[in-house]
Every structure is written in C-alpha cells, then in structure tokens.
Amino acid sequence: MSDEKKNFLKCDDVSFYYKNSEQKETILNHINLDITPGSIIAILGHNGSGKSTLAKHFNGVLVSKSGELYFNDSKIRDMRIEIKKHIGMVFQNPDNQIVASTVQEDVAFGLQNLGLESEEIRIRIDEALEAVSMKDYANWDTHKLSGGQKQRIAIAGILAMKPECIVLDEPTSMLDPQGRKEVMAVIQQLRKKFGITVILITHFMEEAVECDRVIVMKHGTVLMDDIPSKVFNRDIELKNAGLKIPQSIQLMQLLRSEGIDISLNCLTEAQCIDEIYKLLEV
Ligand SMILES: Nc1ncnc2c1ncn2[C@@H]1O[C@H](COP(=O)(O)OP(=O)(O)O)[C@@H](O)[C@H]1O
Ligand SMILES: [Mg+2]
C-alpha cells in the first residue's frame, strides 16, 4: 500500500437510486469522499440516511447511477469481482456471516476461491485467528460462540484474504457491551498493527470518537466530514441529523453550564476522566 496513490478509495460525485423502488428516490446524492490509506473512518447517520447503500458501493455490490468510485485509481465498476479481495465487508448480524460448522473452516471459506496452496491457507487461517485473539478456538463449533466471538471470526475471514480496506457495517450493534469491546479492540488493531484502512459504520458515538475522521450522512448526502472534535462540536446540526453527541461531551457541557471551567475538547472516556481528575487536583 503506497501513500503516493492519489485515489486509494474515492467517491467522485456518486449518486444512486434503487431500481425496484417505485418513486426512484435518490438514495445517494452527489457523494464526494477521498479516503486516506491507513486511516480509520467512522460513518454516522440516522437510519435510512444511506450508509449501507454507500458501503455496498465500496466493494462493488452496488454500482453508482452517476459519478464514479475509484480504488487505487481504477474504477470499481470495472473490477466488481476483484474488488472483494481488496475491500472486505463485515455486516451487522454475526449469525448471518458464519457459513461453516467450525471456526477454522469458516475462516477458510473465502480463501478457497483464491486458488491458494493448502499450506498458504493454513498459515493465513492461523494469522487471522491470532489477529482476532481466537486462535484457541480454531476447532470450536461456530454455533457455540458468543456474538462478539462470531463477529471476530467474520473479521478473521475477511482478514485472511489480506485486504487493504475493511468496511464494517454496524458490526457491534447486535452485541452486548463485552462483545462490543472485544470487536472494537480488534478493529483498532487492524489499523495499528496491519495498516488496514477501516471504514466503520456505527451508531455508537463512543466508537466514532476513537476514529481519525468522522463522516456524517443525512438524506444521502455528506453533511459533515472532519476530525471527531470538530464534528462533535456541531451539536445542534448533529441533533437535526437525528444523532446524539457522545456522553463524554454531554458531561463536559453539563459541567460547563454549571459554571465549572472544564475543557470541551475531550472526546474519549479516558480524556474525560483525565480532565475531571485535573480539576479535582487543584
Ligand atoms: N434493496 C433496497 N431496495 C429499495 N430501497 C432500499 C433498499 N435498501 C435500502 N433502501 C432504501 O434506501 C434508503 C437508505 O437505506 P440504507 O442505505 O440501508 O440506510 P442506512 O444504512 O443509513 O440505515 C432507505 O430509505 C431504504 O429504505
Ligand atoms: Mg444500514
């Protein structure tokens, strides 16, 4: 992966409507995005704002009606099969993504179509399971796994294909807090350890603050595209887009409204705790 590539992943004026829908309502409306390799990006937006529709354009499941998507300067519409090796997708429901009865068979599933040697397949399965901290479960029955473990296996299945980018569409929304934590830890590792570009669609603000960049969608358009601190400062617009601001910022705002001189610049829970400690020390 090279930083010199001009268009690692780019949406150039992308518009889309579903053919089967009666009114041919425009679902994506002139979307422009330029995704930097190696970054982790959150996509936020109210239900129906077009997040999943956009995600399906990234790996060629859907093709824009006008405008163009590029991966490494090639049009994604011209590489709809090949693109799946470069850009993997993880979906919301862990149960829908498990296809085999054991963990290692499940991770192997996508690899079987790549024409790899069996030794290479074995190595890739080991590496992918290691990356999601599931190596000890290689022979487990997939039905016996928790939701968080199933999502980690789904991520391992994608990782084993060695993609440059992973798009995760609300991967934690069906998980309990423990499962969410496990999956988020793995997602952060994808970028930090493997340099994989991560696009995380989420409705958890706490997950978005951990990202490099936050894209907010509204009615099929990009309403905001900026670093988390800038996006979450626009609380009224976020509210109008049907979103909340992270609890950490809500707490800081509440403290300030009570006359307490505390910075509004803390986004994560950890930063928030640090700021409160600072105040208590004085
Ligand atoms: N297969 C489909 N056929 C027709 N309309 C669809 C289809 N999938 C989604 N839509 C419509 O497209 C809009 C955006 O949906 P979606 O991309 O799933 O939004 P989000 O992921 O942000 O909730 C919604 O109005 C939804 O009803
Ligand atoms: Mg969706």
Image (cartoon, rainbow, N blue to C red):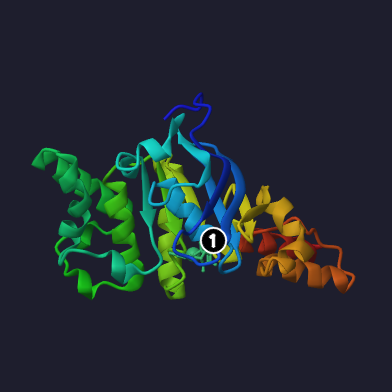
Q: In the image shown, does 61 or 282 lie closer to the viewer?
A: 61
Quarter of the figure that contains the C terminus: bottom right
- Identify the residue under disc 1: 24
Q: Residue at x 21, y 44 (%)?
A: 124
Q: In the image shown, does 88 or 143 lie closer to the viewer?
A: 88
Quarter of the figure that contains the N terminus: top left
Q: In the image shown, does 115 or 153 lie closer to the viewer?
A: 115
Figure quadrant of residue 236? bottom right
With 122 as the anchor, is 86 left or right in this view?
Answer: right
Q: Is residue 189 visible?
A: no
Q: Is residue 179 visible?
A: yes
Residue 271 image position (x, y, % from top left): 66, 58
Q: Residue at x 19, y 41 (%)?
A: 114
Q: In the image shown, does 93 or 221 lie closer to the viewer?
A: 221
Give the amino acid type for the residue marked by disc 1 in the picture: Lys
Residue farthest along the top direction in this orientation: 4
Residue 279 image position (x, y, % from top left): 79, 64
Residue farthest along the front direction in this orientation: 22
Residue 25 image position (x, y, % from top left): 57, 62
With 26 as the anchor, is 136 left or right in this view?
Answer: left
Callout 1: CB less than 8 Å from ligand 1: no
- Give the structural element (helix, strand or loop) at label 1: loop
Q: Residue at x 48, y 34 (%)?
A: 8
Figure quadrant of residue 145? bottom left
Q: Residue at x 43, y 76 (%)?
A: 176
Position of 11 relative to 131 (above/below): above
Figure quadrant of residue 143? bottom left
With 229 as the anchor, is 96 left or right in this view?
Answer: left
Residue farthest along the right direction in this orientation: 259
Residue 129 image position (x, y, % from top left): 26, 53
